Amino acid sequence: MRLASRFGYAANQIRRDRPLTHEELIRHVPSIFGEDRHISRSERYAYIPTITVLENLQREGFQPFFACQTRVRDPGRRGYTKHMLRLRRAGEINGEHVPEIILLNSHDGTSSYQMLPGYFRFVCQNGCVCGQSLGEVRVPHRGNVVEKVIEGAYEVVGVFDRIEEKRDA
């Protein structure tokens, strides 16, 4: 698996030991609340704000605990830049290793929706992403994106047992 994103030291980010509020997300990662696609995108581009996808995933029991977005030099791209949310399922927030869904997106065409399994280590508060290609899901900006993203989230959750086996091996 190749994570097709890079969030450097200068990225805006927020991490909490509880679900993030909308106010925290607006303050630190405003690109998830974008109101339209970037002007460089055509009419075929199925624009759905990340916040809409997040709200649907929250109804399915997934909550954001970490969020970040890249910094860009072009002010015209700031509200559309690449961002990442790390989501945990209700009932799976405690323990030495907690399974997470990592959701990446942008509204400027630089990224499809990407979802992949990850593990959060409570030992040192560092996030670890599994390096094996187990359950990565990419959803292009076409058609019913929200439904495909939720289906993809369940696919990713379904591979956590395999990740646990590989991690312990």
Image (cartoon, helix red, strand yellow):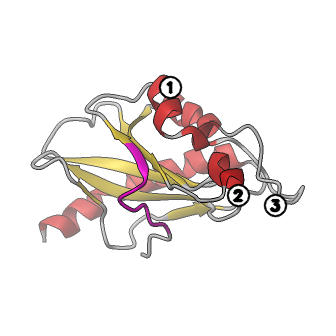
Q: Amino acid at mark 1?
A: His
Instruction: Report the front residue among 64 and 139.
Output: 64
**Mark 3 element type:** loop
The crowd level at tag 3 (other Cα within 10 Å; few <14, some 14-19, many 20+) is few
Does 156 sit left or right of 169 as displayed?
Answer: right
Q: Is residue 105 left or right of residue 18?
A: right
Q: Which mark is residue 40?
A: 3
Q: Position of residue 149 (x, y in %)?
A: 59, 49
The location of residue 38, given as percent across then percent down, is: 77, 53
Q: Residue at x 62, y 63 (%)?
A: 111
**Rendered image: mark on residue 48:** none
Please give the name of the residue rendered at 69% of the width and 49% of the height, measured from the top-left corner.
Answer: 145
Measured Cα–Cα span from mark 1 to mark 2: 22 Å
Q: Which residues are magenta?
A: 5-13
Q: Which mark is residue 22?
A: 1
State the residue in front, 153 or 26. 26
Looking at the rendered image, the disc whose residue lies closer to the viewer, 3 or 1, is: 3
